[in-house]
Image (cartoon, rainbow, N blue to C red):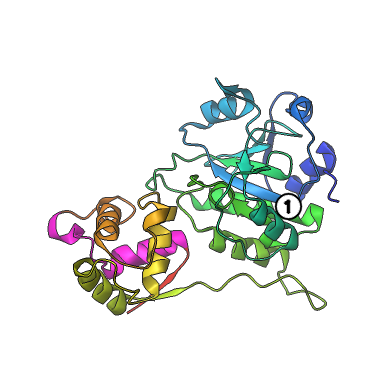
Amino acid sequence: MATPPSADAFLKALKDEGLTVVEVGDWRGHNRNHKGPWGPVHGVMLHHTVTKGTARTVEICRKGYAGLPGPLCHGVIAKDGRVHLVGYGRTNHAGLGDDDVLRAVIAEKNLPTDNEASTDGNRHFFGFECENLGDGQDPWPAVQLEAIEKAAAAVCRLMGWDAPSVLGHREWQPGKVDPRGFGMDDMRVWIHDRLNPKGPSKPSTTPPPPKRPVVDLSQLVAAARSNPKAAGQPVTYSGVKVVEAALVDAGLLAKKFSDGHYGTTTVTAYATWQRSAAGGGYRGKDADGIPGKASLTALGRAHGFTVKD
């Protein structure tokens, strides 16, 4: 059983990891414990806030809003990399999620697809809200990404966990897309490397972080040009599934259309990516839904795959 550490131990772990921490009000005693237990705790969950402005974001995460009282997390990670502590204990951040995902987090195995909302996540996870609009275009400053990595690693170090104990809200609760704008597999690799800078001193039972998939541009383009003309045909190139998963992460494609067939719905979703600022801001025939190297590389950088010419 993973008993939650004291608030002071939590604060020390964050500072020891090199983070700048802002203590907001009586954060140590601000929680939702009267609604149910907090613990055993099994992992760290990351979110984006869909807000702009650090002061406003921190205020919302501390107090909540109509229908969802605060605190909405334990810490808010701002654009400048500072971590604002707003609560400690049970917080309204995770909601109901998939019990198969919870079991995988506990076992530190690769996560299955979340397909049900049956288990209380507020009880079992630390939560960090990260200041970002979550529209796929709001940038993630390097200092903020490093702070996210450090905050998650600090909790893992404190609890004796490794990177597979860190997940995104989108990996826990069906229908959620946060955090949007960076790949969770990438984040877990960075956290693992921070926790294991020289490798383990003894054989580890923790699985290595998953390798980044490689998408062959020429094979993907061939699928994109041929698949829409053959509705329902079998998968022609496995990389299509990788790209569709990234489009789902970006909030541009519904999960039910992530089927490995680069059909008209995928073409439309990819065209939207091409037109977005993050995808290159293309217009006209340059945003026709057929992948180009620059837009595909940008999608892979944001959502965890590598492009091969």
Quadrant in the picture for residue 24: top right
Label 1 is placed on what type of residue?
Ala
Image quarter in which the C terminus is found: bottom left
Q: Is residue 121 visible to the viewer in this orientation of the structure?
A: yes
Q: Is residue 114 left or right of residue 215?
A: right
Q: Is residue 96 above or below residue 55?
A: below
Q: Is residue 94 visible to the viewer in this orientation of the structure?
A: no
Residue linked to disc 1? 154
**Magenta part of the protein: which range?**
284-303
Q: Is residue 298 magenta?
A: yes
Which residue is at a point 62% across and 38% down the rendered structure image? Answer: 95
Which residue is at a point 58% across and 54% down the rendered structure image? Answer: 146
Label 1 CA crowd tier, 10 Å (few <14, some 14–19, many 20+): many
Which residue is at a point 32% across and 67% down the rendered structure image? Answer: 261
Quadrant in the picture for residue 239: bottom left
Seen from the viewer's position, the closer of residues 204 and 66 is 66
